[in-house]
Image (cartoon, coloured by chain):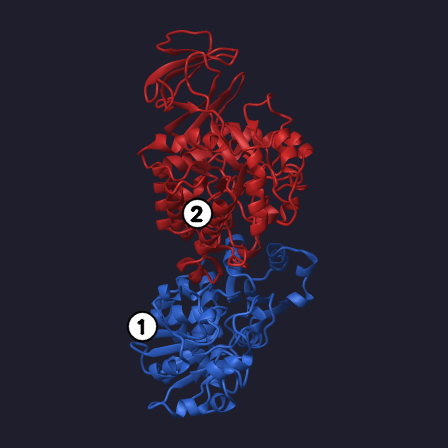
Chain colours: A red, B blue
Amino acid sequence: MSFLLKSATIVDQHSTHHLSKKDILINDQGIIEKIGSIQKADAEVIRSDNLTVSPGWFDLRANFCDPGYEYKEDLFNGLKLAAASGFTAVVPVPNTKPVIQNKNDINYLQRFNGQQTVKVYPSGAVTIDCKGSDLTEMLDMYHAGALVFTDGHMPIWNTDILVKTLMYLQKTGGLLINRPEDKRLTAFASMHEGEQSTVLGMKGMPSLSEEIMIIRDLNLLNYAGGRIHFSTISTEKAVKIIKKAKKKGAKVSCDVAAYQLVFDDSLLHDYDTNYKVNPPLREKSDQRNLIKGVKEGTINAIVSAHEPQDEECKKLEFDLADYGMLSLQTVFPNIVTASDGNDLELFIDKLTYGPRTVLGLETPTIETGNRAEITAFDPDDTWWYGGANNLSKSHNSPQLGQELKGKVIGAINGTHHHINHFVKP
Amino acid sequence: MSELSVNHLLGIKNLTYDDLQLIFEIADQFKEVINRPIKKVPSLRDITIANVFFENSTRTRLSFELAEKRLSADVINFSSSSSSVKKGETLLDTVNNILAMKVDMIVMRHPSPGAPHFLAKHIKANIVNAGDGTHEHPTQALLDTFSIRSKHTSFEGLKVAIIGDILHSRVAISNIFALKKLGAEVMVCGPNTLIPKFIHTLGVQVELDVMKALQWCDVANVLRIQLERQQIKYFPSTREYSLYYGINKAMLDSLDKEITIMHPGPINRGVELASDVADSDHSIILDQVENGVAIRMAVLYLLASVRSNQ
């Protein structure tokens, strides 16, 4: 199928058309045939008042719950959902049942690659069952297609395992992703520690639990060499520590969940379990500094941290409910809110070049003759997030039922595409 | 004002100053009722109340049950030991099953903070929080402040020290909210490991030395060490705790003033309070128990009035 994107603002810092408004013709071979003024073409025309395009978005962290928890989400549905959210590539977390920890598992996750708009870049577990004690066969997984190694939700708490992984992965250039959390400091806690946790009578997770792990891991990195990526950082100080380490030349990168840029712990006032996430929603000052970190470039990528949960896991007392929020379809609206009308291109960069650079991948630029890997969106348009417009199998989002500003129009990846057709409430 | 601003008693945090005064005024009347030869009034005779307790309780449950019976309500009791909760039923299912039997009000104690708030979002009955984990215990704070009110002329400038395990105490948080709304000054005192790190954000002073806290206060509300709620160790031994945080008569005698001693019960005698303090003239511990019935009658009565006006 051919597409003509009319009067689209191109957000692509490596393109000669960066920030200019052009018509873009993509032919039925999935190639960008022409960029300029195109009056007529035998193609499906895509229009929107403030149509904007960028290279296809890349999500470094989403949970598709497959295999094992297919009733919450599954790979096929997850890929459709990601495409509808504007993504053309996703790294699913390995915390499935069983855990993604051998080359068969890696192949299982890649089985739809080439047939869908979204390509899966599998991540393999660092330790067997993500339990933190015995290393998996990472080289074997790397050769099967895994570029990323992580225990996903589970922090790698064992210093010796972390050092060995950093050393072991240097042969391949595979990326180690760690979720910085000292589990001893967060034991029995289910929200951020601060005024709000005191008022709500809940044990809190101190910001320190994240920061102390980052400091620890940076020291281990300094000893072992290699590189490390911190997943879903959430505190003001974490941004500052990483900024300082980068200045000193440490091979470190990090990402943040889009919802952390717009939500804070005051939203937990009535114990809404849809806001129960890990790392927890922190304070306004953390939120401000995370946004600053994105704009300054300390934070390399924005991730969805999509975590579907079924009703049985969420319609419960707060401390008994599971962590997680549906967050793929809300990435763009949340970014639009966080940017508040300024520097949106800096945020988009963290969905395009940022994550690919972290993985050492090339970003597909928007130039004539290139294969089209493009996300089309309108930051000013609104849509209703509810009913049939929620494409996840689960419903655990506090934003469901709301009119959201920032609409993904669709994603095109070569000859595959997904164009959204949202219904009204 | 003759009506509460809320449909449920989920916590003191949600109450206004006027709500507190109204509850006190109604409790004054019920206190007079329960001291009559015939201690019963027909106010709630068309109301069925379920006392749903997912945690052990003796005095709170007895106090609620007595209050309900004094108001002529029909009462049913449910506790987790005899419940289907252990068979894996959710809280919502359990409560909906009880409500299907046409129950009007739920008095609930639950180990999860926010459990009554969760329930309030999903069911129609009026809910009274009888303690939710380490969050709030609103009727305890109401009876505590009601008891202080009968001993001291005004809350304005009154200094109240809450001493003991603040971290695991729902009584502490509810008392802080109530006392601050009424105009009192509040200090918390205990081992630093048992004081929430951000408690100062609630506008209270923090003191680690129990003697200094006693010297500062007019009223000392001494809390129990909640060993059953401590999932990890916060201090080495009860022996050391009682040595450094226990209150005895010699300590009170060394003060140049008389202070009021309170305790929500049950007392660990010899740990946080020596017997010669618990049983002394300073102590209003048994007044608290008596006032508990009057306060709970007032709360149930006022919530039932809100219900009938809906």
- Coordinates of residue A17 in the picture (x, y in percent): 35, 18
**Pair 1/2: label in front:** 2
Q: Quadrant of the N terminus of chain B?
A: bottom left
Near-viewer residue (A144 or B42): A144
Position of A213 with respect to A104 (left or right) is: left
- Coordinates of residue A153 in the picture (x, y in percent): 56, 46
Q: Chain of mark 2?
A: A
Q: CA distance from mark 1 to mark 2?
A: 37 Å
What residue would you read off at disc 1? B183
Near-viewer residue (A107 or B274): A107
Q: Which picture quadrant has residue A50?
A: top left
Question: Marks 1 and 2: CB-CB under 8 Å?
Answer: no
Residues at discs 1 and 2 both on one chain: no
Query: Dot 1 lies on which element?
Result: loop
- Coordinates of residue B253 in the picture (x, y in percent): 39, 93
Against A270, residue B189 (above or below) is below
Q: Tell me the crowding category of disc 1: few under 14, some 14 to 19, or many 20 or more residues within 10 angstroms, Cα based.
A: some
Q: Amino acid at mark 1?
A: Gly
Q: Chain of mark 1?
A: B
Residue shown at 34% from the left, 72% from the top:
B182
- Coordinates of residue B42 in the picture (x, y in percent): 52, 74
Q: Quadrant of the C terminus of chain B?
A: bottom left
Q: How many marks?
A: 2
Q: Which picture quadrant has residue A116?
A: top right
Against A218, residue B284 (above or below) is below
What residue would you read off at disc 2? A234
Residue A324 got which mark?
A: none
Against A63, residue A89 (above or below) is above
Q: Is residue A92 visible?
A: no
Q: Which picture quadrant has residue A102?
A: top right
Against A320, residue A408 (above or below) is above
